[in-house]
Structure formats: C-alpha cells, structure tokens
Image (cartoon, rainbow, N blue to C red):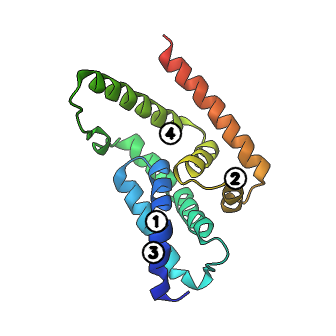
Amino acid sequence: MEAYEFSSLIDEYGNSIYRFCQGMTYTVEDAEDLYQQTFLTAFEKRHKIDKSNNPKAYLMTIASNLWKSHKSSYARHERIAPTVSYDDMEHEVPDDSADIDESIIRSDEEQMLRNNIDRLPEKLKQVVVMFYSSELSIEDISKVLHIPKGTVKSRLHNAKEQLRIMMEREVSP
C-alpha cells in the first residue's frame, strides 16, 4: 500500500479503532496515545496491508498488541498516581427536572458499567470492547486475537454474565 492510500484507512476505520482504544485504556489521553501509536505502526508496516484482506482486523491487531505491551506501565501508573478523566463529566443539562433525573441515573449506570468492564479479566474485557465498542464481528475478533470463534463466544458470554452479577451487586444493598 502506498502512503497516499493510507489516509483512506484512517477515514474508514479510525472511529472503530479509537473506540477500541477508549475502551481498553483508562483516560482519554491514553486512548489518544494508543490510537496514534496504532496508526503510526500501521503506517510503518503499510507494505504489509492488503485492502482486500480485512485491514480493520489488521489495525485492531496492531492496537491490541500495542495495548498488551503497554498495559503493565498503564497499570503501574494507575497504582502510583491514579488519574481522573473529566471528559465524562461534561454533559448538556436538560431543561426539564425529570430529564435531569433520568440523565443523572443514566450517567451513573453508564459509569457503573464502565467501571465494571474495567474490573473484568483482561481477556474478557478485550472481547467486550472489540464487540460492543469497535463493532467487530465474532470472526474478526477471532482473527485479531488468534483464538477460535467458539472461544470468542464463550468469553463474551462469560463477560456478560460477570457484568450482570457485578451490576446486580451494586444495585442491591
């Protein structure tokens, strides 16, 4: 693939890759770093990219491998100096007080779900983020992670079950 063709990959798959990066990292800054590193690495390896052979899965593999190689430093950083992202706190305030209550409840539930996804084992978290945030198919996730489709389905099922249990525990006193 030539350098001038590469920008079409960013246009076509950039949003999916970014959503994956957001789902796997702890802050917006980390997600942006992972996203940029993914496309920088892909640009360096552009001669290996075949547009007819699922370039989205190839890009996702790069992002996944970069995440795996950097997650220990992310975890170490979080243990030493936890960071807080204020991006999640910026919401439009609805006019109606009933809408405000619904918005607050929805926001709390979404934050609870995000926190529980972060608490999942890495193998389950990765599959959930790829499937729901990056909208990869079971087959594409299988290719990216180099695991059988049945394993992807099993991990998705286990993740959903663990999330259901975690959410029930948090809602019930």
Q: Amino acid at mark 1?
A: Gly
Q: Position of residue 78 (x, y in %)?
A: 40, 43
**Is residue 131 placed above or below 35 in the rendered structure?**
above
The disc placed on residue 40 is 3
Question: Distance of mark 1 from mark 2, alpha carbons?
Answer: 20 Å
Question: Distance of mark 4 from mark 2, alpha carbons?
Answer: 21 Å
Tag in front: 4 or 2: 2
The residue pinned by badge 2 equals: 138
The residue pinned by badge 1 equals: 14
- For the residue pair 26 and 140, the one nearer the viewer reads as 140
Q: Residue at x 70, y 62 (%)?
A: 143
Tag in front: 3 or 2: 2
**In the image, farthest residue toward the top:** 173
- Marked residue nearer the N-terminal end (1 or 3): 1
Question: Distance of mark 1 from mark 3, alpha carbons?
Answer: 12 Å
Question: Distance of mark 1 from mark 4, alpha carbons?
Answer: 23 Å
Q: Secondary structure at mark 2?
A: helix
Q: Position of residue 74 (x, y in %)?
A: 44, 51
- For the residue pair 89 and 83, the one nearer the viewer reads as 89
Instruction: Decide: few, some or many residues near mark 2? Use Cα within 10 Å; few <14, some 14-19, many ≥20.
Output: some
Tag in front: 1 or 4: 1
Instruction: Decide: few, some or many residues near mark 1? Use Cα within 10 Å; few <14, some 14-19, many ≥20.
Output: some
- Marked residue nearer the N-terminal end (1 or 2): 1
Q: Residue at x 63, y 34 (%)?
A: 160
Q: Quadrant of the N terminus?
A: bottom right
Q: Amino acid at mark 4?
A: Asp
